Amino acid sequence: MSNIPTTLGGRSGVYLREGPNTAMPTRAQPVATPQDARTRLVRGQLVEVRSAPEIAATLDADGKLDGLPFMPEMAKLCGQRFRVDRRADITCVEGHGLRRLQDTVFLEDVRCDGAAHDGCERRCLMFWKEAWLKPVEATDAPSIIPPSSKSTNALKDLPTRVGDRYLCQSTELATATADLPSWNMLPFISQVRDGELSVNRFVQIVALALFNMARKALGFKEVGRLTGEKSKSTKSDLNLQPGEWVRVKSREEIEKTLDPASRNRGLLFEPEMTEYTGKYFQMDAPVSRMIHEETGKMIPLTNTVALKRLTCQGLCAKSCPRNNYWFWREDWLERVPSLAARPDGSA
């Protein structure tokens, strides 16, 4: 267990602080941006990933646009069509909180498979600059994309390391974003206008933030925060396999596995995860390694899994759209018989 940091935590329940950040390379300017890429994309809009030459023309010498890298895992998607899931005008950045991002969207469940980053299993949603996409109609003929070209190979060969530090969208997100003052409500108003955030959800987020501020001032824990008394967290080995059904243990059972900082062997049990206690879900995939967002180092994990459909909904992070998977220690779960009659995860 000595290889797993203990001073860790984070908004998405993953490891955060392990050491000082590595200095970032100086940004260069992109070569060009397609002229018709200025259209503001909205939720549900059909788009096509531009060709490799078009995308390559937008990138600077570091393979970035406005500080955001185009990753090798994205190259194989050139010419494919997807629908816009949400805009990424705001995003949470580990260690920095909520920050602003320009001209960027998420596509429906288009996640990084970590193939070019030594098998990182975090499965982050990829950020897409609008300059890398073009709006299309369903009746439009698909673009003809050569199976192999110099530009395609160049995108596949974009750097993934800077020294001993991994380079990906996650690790570069702090430098690709700008500060968002806590009083600035314009991004949230834009989310409501674009149909990405309902008025009721907006009120819920604001109310929760104010309520937690009041609880903190009075010396109470934030809503949903579970803490334990163990100085050394427990470790279970269920050897769960994809597709198996599990029950998320009760609050009381989970608290017995946590230390006073709400962690189990460094992994934070987030307040939003408390919503799922006592309910049933299927195991999606084991998580054995992922890249630390702040340090760029690969972090090993043991006895940790992702559950199907359980991703961060941004309630604790003020409507952050990253939709990161929650990671669950097997200590927080128990194996149960097949529950095909309960596909909705109900208790």
Image (cartoon, helix red, strand yellow):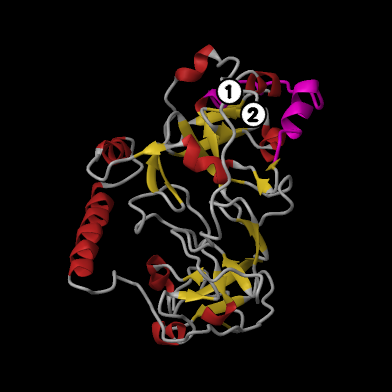
Q: Position of residue 119 (x, y in %)?
A: 72, 54
Quadrant in the rendering for residue 347? bottom left
Q: Is residue 95 left or right of residue 187?
A: right
Tell which of 19 and 280 is nearer to you. Answer: 19
Which mark, by number, is residue 311?
Answer: none
In this rendering, the answer to whether 313 lies above or below 229 is above
Q: Position of residue 136 (x, y in %)?
A: 54, 23
**198 or 288: nearer the eye?**
288
- Quadrant location, the N terminus: bottom right
- Provide the residue span drawn in magenta: 131-160
Note whether 164 is above or below 30 in the view shown: below
Residue corresponding to mark 2: 62
Q: Which residue is mark 1?
A: 28
Q: Is residue 135 in view?
A: no
In the image, residue 103 lies in the stretch drawn in magenta? no
**Residue 20 on image: x %, y %:** 54, 53
Q: Are marks 2 and 1 in contact (CB under 8 Å)?
A: yes
Determine the CA span between mark 2 and mark 1: 7 Å
User: The residue under label 2 is which amino acid type?
Assistant: Asp
- Where residue 244 appears, as percent x and y from the top left, is 64, 75
* Residue 47 vs residue 101, the one in the foreground: 101
Query: At 76% from the left edge and 27% from the top edge, which residue is drawn?
Result: 154
**Residue at the image point whose x is 46% and y is 80% from the top:** 258
Which of pointers 2 and 1 lies earlier in the amino acid sequence? 1
Residue for point 26% across, 50% down: 202
Judged by its main secondary structure, the magenta piece is loop
Q: Is residue 292 above or below residue 67?
A: below
